[in-house]
Amino acid sequence: MDFNDSPDEAAFRAEARAWLAAHAPAHVLTPGDKMPDIEEADRGRAWMRELYAGGWSGLTFPKALGGRGLSGAEAVIFAEEEGKYHLPKGPFTSIGTGMALPVIAKHGTDEQKARFIEATLKGDLTWCQLFSEPAAGSDLAALRTKAVRTEDGSDDWIVNGQKVWSSWAHLTDWGILVVRSDPTLPKHKGLTFFVVDMKTPGIETRPIRQISGASEFNETFLTDVRIPDANRIGAEGEGWACCMTVLMGERLGSGAHRSGVEPLLDFAAATPDGHGGTMLDDRAIRQQLAEALAEEQGERFFQARLRTMVSRGENPGALAGMVKLAYAGRYQKTNGLALEMRGLAGIAPEAGDTAAGDVQYDYIYSTVMRIAGGADEVLRNQIAERVLGMPGEVRMDKNVPFETLKG
Amino acid sequence: MNFDLSDEQKMLGEQARSLLADMSSFDRLRTLIDSGAEWDEPLWRALADMGFLGAAIPEEHGGLGLGALDLGVIMEALGGANAAVPFMSSIILAAEAIGLAGSEAQKAAWLPKLASGHAVATFAYAEGPGPVFGRSATLTDGKLSGSKMPVADAGIADIAVVLVADGGFALVELDQPSVTRTKLESFDQLRPHYRLDFADAVAEAMPGSGKLDRLIDQAAVQAAFEAAGASDACLTMARDYAMERRMFGRPLAGYQAIKHKLADVAVANELARSNAYYGGWAAESSPGDLPAAAAAARLSGIKCFELAARENLQVHGGIGYTFEANCHFYYRRERMLAVHLGSRGFWADRLLNAQPGSQVKAA
């Protein structure tokens, strides 16, 4: 057992580190720097271009498709080194490389690969995800946005419906879209997958006013949107398989978040306990902070075990969901605790108390962590079924035409 | 990065599990309880024959000279079987204490016997309610006075390493008139505990000082391995029962109330196991990281086994309350393991104190 790189890994890390040292600083964001979304997205594109020019895009992508054909272990090493810089990365970069490209590479035609992959790796094309709907979240296959093939000889599709939680849909170039193309089939069988130019007439994005006060998510309305059949990914009815390709990428990516119990120790130390000491002297607070530190450490080293599996070419599967499940719950619990220890002064801090503001934001945002990328309950089902081998859920929606299901 | 056990360590764990499956069945545990046995002596002999007792004892003293991770996979297997043996007392605590603080003569006299199982030792640290590591016993001119209680395995132990006034260790042979052993009623029916009274008992000081922290940090890592093994056994038992048991026309295991509960147990177990691995790595390769690693491992070990032992019995329902079902072994063992070596609050302080700038300001 060790944390050392193999000689090959060490050489790769040194190469990555040297390249980043030369090229990353020019792209680094200043902490606390607020900029308009469009500027952030443009800086994201610029970093993508830099990565592509340096040969660091699409690390695990086959060389034939413009990637480098490296292993998952090398991708992890690059991510670790890249993570040392505060770079303009976000959904506007990761949905393209982490979701759109894997699905196009696996299910797309040669023509689609040629058209989208290199352009995306270069940052020329950015992507949003048009999956969830108001009545289709964890049960994604319940989606109702409808695609009908025209009978005007063009073979185009006309799409109508509403998507939601489409991050950065207002500023990205293309979207990955899953729709219902045949409601007479059972729900998972009647879906078809498309890529869609977000400038197509009939697409309207509206920012969602979120509980955090921010609006990085959108609702996207599709009204008589015409999509050429050439933009269909995979066969008609193959939409669910395409979604699975996308969502596997999302799950593996979701375990890698940084946590933050340490700043809460500082926060406790900066909070008077009313008896001449600080909240870091309080037994009850100490107990909870220590439990959180132990969980955080466990998540970190469980992640290390999973990375070891990946570097051996094994697939952690549902084990990856364990890290996300643990992390999201702890994130909410610890930030809730931090608000509690500060008392009313944490609820209504004085102007300039940025630490309390951060805790407030994290407490609000932790709710997203427990829902997005596999809700707690979905992950528990997956762990029970795929890790522990327990039975799947009783289903009312299998082998029944979608149109006969009660919403 | 290679954050996994070696193939040799995995094989060692497999050998231990296989031996325990043969010798330490639940029926065997029931027989031991019914007969009022102090321990599973044949199992101890078998563990000695396989070299497990001496796994981490240096080769010059009759052991195999392996490390904390090797010991950890054995502890994980012992925890899984809920074995009735003094491995924590004799090997993890007493033998390590002698190795850390003993004189060359003390090591030469006792480590080979502990490795071969010809002698059993215990570590006497508690003094009733109050501080976890009591220091009111005194050693003066080779005479030990005071009381220790409860002390695990003192009925069968030949020697005890006793924590004394200055935080040092005294080595005392228990078979002498000035040592009185009084058996206590033990909540864990397979781990007997005693009160030890020393009235000017003949004892030797151990020359090494200031070794207590290192000793209990190492033991905390091993306790986390033991807890992870025990929790996994509970999880498997609960899963298997739920798969077999049918309720309202379908397997109990198909209900989310059960699936989600066991998924949470599985997550807690993996976090504890990961922390135990890190603790074992730190003990072997990075002693500066050991205090924080050990405390985190200890806390997550307590947490996972608490959850697993309780929910295992709960999933079994009424049958879980019977002596014939096997949940009770773990349910009792869990409380013992949760408090030996200091409970949650003790290790929470140690974990925070190991973070830079987070020490308690007013004691």
Image (cartoon, rainbow, N blue to C red):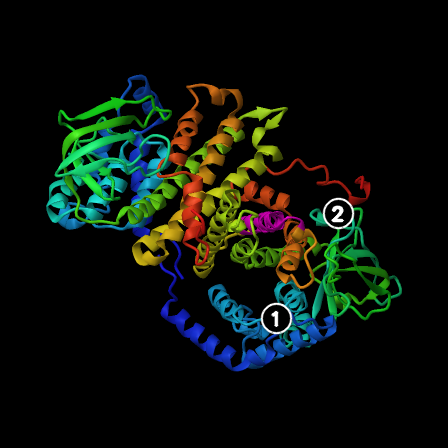
Viewer can see residue B322: yes
- Please provide percent x and percent y for residue B183: 27, 22
Label 2 residue SS: helix
The residue at the point 25 percent across, 30 percent down is B147
Question: Chain under label 1?
Answer: A
Say what amino acid the circle numbered 2 marks.
Answer: Ala
Residue that lies at the very extreme toward the front in this rendered image: A276
Q: In terms of depth relative to the viewer, which is nearer, A248 or B221?
A: B221
Q: Measured along the vertical axis of the image, is residue A386 above or below residue A315? A: above
Q: Disc 2 is attached to a residue of which chain?
A: A
In this rendered view, identify the residue nearer to me: B247 or A92: A92
Q: Is residue B61 above or below residue B18?
A: below
Q: Residues within 10 Å of mark 1 (few under 14, many from 20)?
A: few
Residue located farthest toward the right when viewing the structure as drawn = A152
Q: Is residue B244 among what the camera can see?
A: no
Q: Upstream in the sequence, badge 2 or badge 1?
A: 1
What span is in magenta? Answer: A322-344
Residue B248 percent across, percent down from the top left: 63, 24
Q: Is residue B1 left or right of residue B20?
A: right
Q: Was residue A323 drawn as part of the magenta stretch in this picture?
A: yes
What residue is disc 2 on?
A: A142
Q: Quadrant of residue B287?
A: bottom left
Q: CA distance from mark 2 to mark 1?
A: 41 Å
**Which residue is denoted by mark 1 in the rendering?**
A31
Say if the magenta span includes residue B321.
no
Task: State the image quarter where residue B44 is shown.
Answer: top left
The quarter in which the C terminus of chain A is drawn is top right
Packing grade of label 2 (10 A; few <14, some 14-19, many >=20) is many
* Amino acid type, residue under disc 1 in the picture: Pro
Helix, strand or loop under label 1: loop
List x then y, in percent, for residue A191. 74, 53
Q: Is residue B343 left or right of residue A112?
A: left
